Image: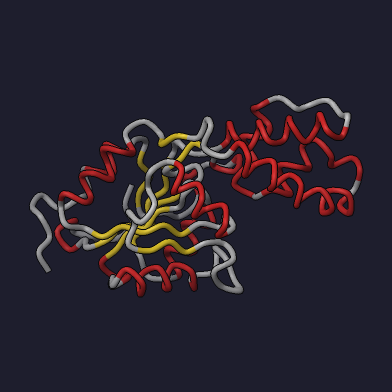
């Protein structure tokens, strides 16, 4: 469903959210939580409730297991949880089915692509390195790159500047309402993906220009011939 005209032949770049859009990182985030629970002597939660909240960050994940202890305890546990996650990061994380082919198609068409994530920089850079994507994107803007994060549009604008892209000729692709809000506020065409974590929401209700159910559907929006300018 589209709400405004956006001819694919005008597209020169694609910005992506990372976790839940390009990468299925929830298994490793859950594994780190299980390790943390074992250290703290509490039962580890099931995978499903953790997967649903991973897009909200480490604190939301910790609340699944430790929320009854109060916010002070959750906050105190964040550094150790992130350290455990860094240890297991990329052991089970992998691109969603079809994502590698989608990125290859973007690159083959001469398009530039970038990542705008709320994930901390030290984790993002290491994760991309471990999965073999280090240096592949033209820009990577993380949750601590600026003083603000998505849904603020500033990280999106920064990624466009770093990648040499005009926001009006780009799309922003994500699995969270904050991605749609940030992309639209920055002047990009917005695409919500239904295969991600979705933060328990319905992507059809976020006001995106389009909702796609697979990377193949997103590939269909790409120019039919390579971009040369």
Residue 190 visible, this angle: no
Q: Residue 69 appears in which quarter of the rendering?
A: top right
Question: Which residue is at a point 49% across and 73% down the rendered structure image?
Answer: 154
Q: Residue 66 appears in which quarter of the rendering?
A: top right
Q: Nearer the viewer, residue 23 or 8?
A: 23
Q: Could you say where residue 31 lies in the image, as x and y percent from the top left?
A: 66, 31
Left or right of residue 6, residue 42 in this image: right
Left or right of residue 134, residue 105 in this image: left
Residue 204 against residue 168 in the figure, above or below: above
Residue 32 visible, this angle: yes
Q: Could you say where residue 49 lies in the image, as x and y percent from the top left?
A: 68, 31
Question: Which residue is at a point 59% across and 66% down the rendered structure image?
Answer: 144
Q: Residue 8 appears in which quarter of the rendering?
A: bottom left
Q: Nearer the viewer, residue 177 or 107?
A: 107
Q: Could you say where residue 54 lies in the image, as x and y percent from the top left?
A: 62, 42
Q: Quadrant of the C terminus?
A: bottom left
Residue 15 against residue 39 in the figure, above or below: below
Question: Which residue is at a point 38% across and 63% down the rendered structure image?
Answer: 139
Question: Which residue is at a point 32% across and 62% down the rendered structure image?
Answer: 138
Scheme of colours in the image: secondary structure
Name of the residue lying farthest toward the right: 69
Q: Could you say where residue 100 lies in the image, as x and y percent from the top left?
A: 31, 38
């Amino acid at each position: 469903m589209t709400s405004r005209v956006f001819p694919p032949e005008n597209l020169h770049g694609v910005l992506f959210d990372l976790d839940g859009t390009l990468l299925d990182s929830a298994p490793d985030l859950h594994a780190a939580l299980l390790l943390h629970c074992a250290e703290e002597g509490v039962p580890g939660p099931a995978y499903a409730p953790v997967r649903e909240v991973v897009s909200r960050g480490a604190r939301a994940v910790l609340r699944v297991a430790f929320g009854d202890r109060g916010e002070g305890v959750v906050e105190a546990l964040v550094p150790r949880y992130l350290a455990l996650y860094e240890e297991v990061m990329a052991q089970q994380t992998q691109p969603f089915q079809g994502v590698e082919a989608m990125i290859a198609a973007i690159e083959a068409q001469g398009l530039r692509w970038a990542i705008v994530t709320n994930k901390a920089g030290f984790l993002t850079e290491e994760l991309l390195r471990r999965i073999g994507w280090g240096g592949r994107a033209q820009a990577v803007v993380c949750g601590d790159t600026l003083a603000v994060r998505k849904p603020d549009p500033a990280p999106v604008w920064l990624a466009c500047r770093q990648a040499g892209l005009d926001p009006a000729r780009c799309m922003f692709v994500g699995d969270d309402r904050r991605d749609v809000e940030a992309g639209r506020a920055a002047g990009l065409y917005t695409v919500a993906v239904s295969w991600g974590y979705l933060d328990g929401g319905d992507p059809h209700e976020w006001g995106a220009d389009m909702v796609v159910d697979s990377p193949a559907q997103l590939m269909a929006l790409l120019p039919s011939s390579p971009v040369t300018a």
